[in-house]
Structures are given as C-alpha cells and as structure tokens.
Image (cartoon, rainbow, N blue to C red):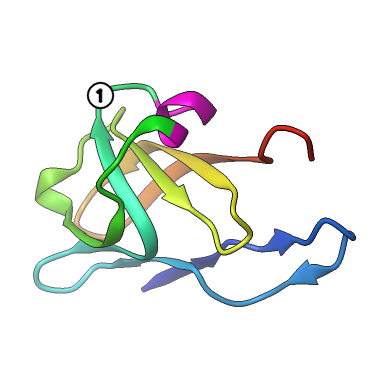
Amino acid sequence: METWILHNLTPSGNLVIGTPEITYEPYNPPSLDISAPAISLGSVEADYNSCRTTTGYKESYFPASDIAVGDYFCIKTSGERYSALKVTGVSDEQLSFDIVTYDPPGN
C-alpha cells in the first residue's frame, strides 16, 4: 500500500501535516482511495479552473480497473486549495501520477 499526504501551507506559511490522504491499495480489487473531496474528470484535463468549477466532489474510492493512464482527478485540500492529479501509470501493483496544487487567487 502506498499513501500520500497532501501537505498544506497556511497563509502564514505554517505547514499543516495530516489528512487528506491519497492511498493506492493493491489488494483485491486494487483501488485508489482519496479521503478528501475528490472527483474524476476522466480524460478532461484538470487545472485550477476545471477543478474550481466542477461539482459533485466527495470522498471517493476508484477501482483500478476504472482508471486509465491520462485520467485526471480534482481534489479539494483541507487548506481550501485544489489539486489536479494526472495518472501516468496504473497496474494492479502500483499507481503513478503527477500532481499540482493551486493556491486560490489572491494568495
């Protein structure tokens, strides 16, 4: 099992460590578990605008069989930011991705 914690910087620059987590569980069935509000955009590119305007976020469980290389996810962090995740590799054993976290405008 792999776990990533999205670290958040507060406006004062203090590091907040903890949830939300992104977990890939190579069990039966393999799955991506995002314990923060998240949504799959499929092949639609995730960026600040697409993440900000998309609705339907929820803590989510995504079976690996439903994830393809090039799929995008938007995640709302506990620091009121959006993270855009792009899947770069997926198998029953592992998941790789690129992720960018955006500050809200004005920060």
Name the residue nearer the viewer: 29 or 85. 85
Q: Is residue 62 left or right of residue 11?
A: left
Label 1 element class: loop
Q: Which residues are the magenta region? A: 46-52
Residue at horizontal 33 percent and vertical 39 percent from the top: 89
Q: Residue furthest right?
A: 12
**Magenta segment, principal secondary structure?**
helix
Q: Would residue 49 be counted in the magenta stretch?
A: yes
Residue at horizontal 42 percent and vertical 69 percent from the top: 2
The percent position of residue 26, horizontal first and vertical second, equals: 24, 68
Name the residue nearer the viewer: 3 or 46. 46
The N terminus, quarter of image = bottom left
Please state which amino acid type lies under the numbered disc 1. Answer: Ser
Name the residue nearer the viewer: 6 or 76. 76
Label 1 CA crowd tier, 10 Å (few <14, some 14–19, many 20+): some
Q: Which quadrant holds residue 45?
A: top left
The vertical placement of 23 against 64, above or below, is: below
Q: Is residue 25 left or right of residue 81?
A: left
The C terminus, quarter of image = top right
The percent position of residue 75, horizontal first and vertical second, equals: 43, 50
Q: Which residue is mark 1?
A: 43
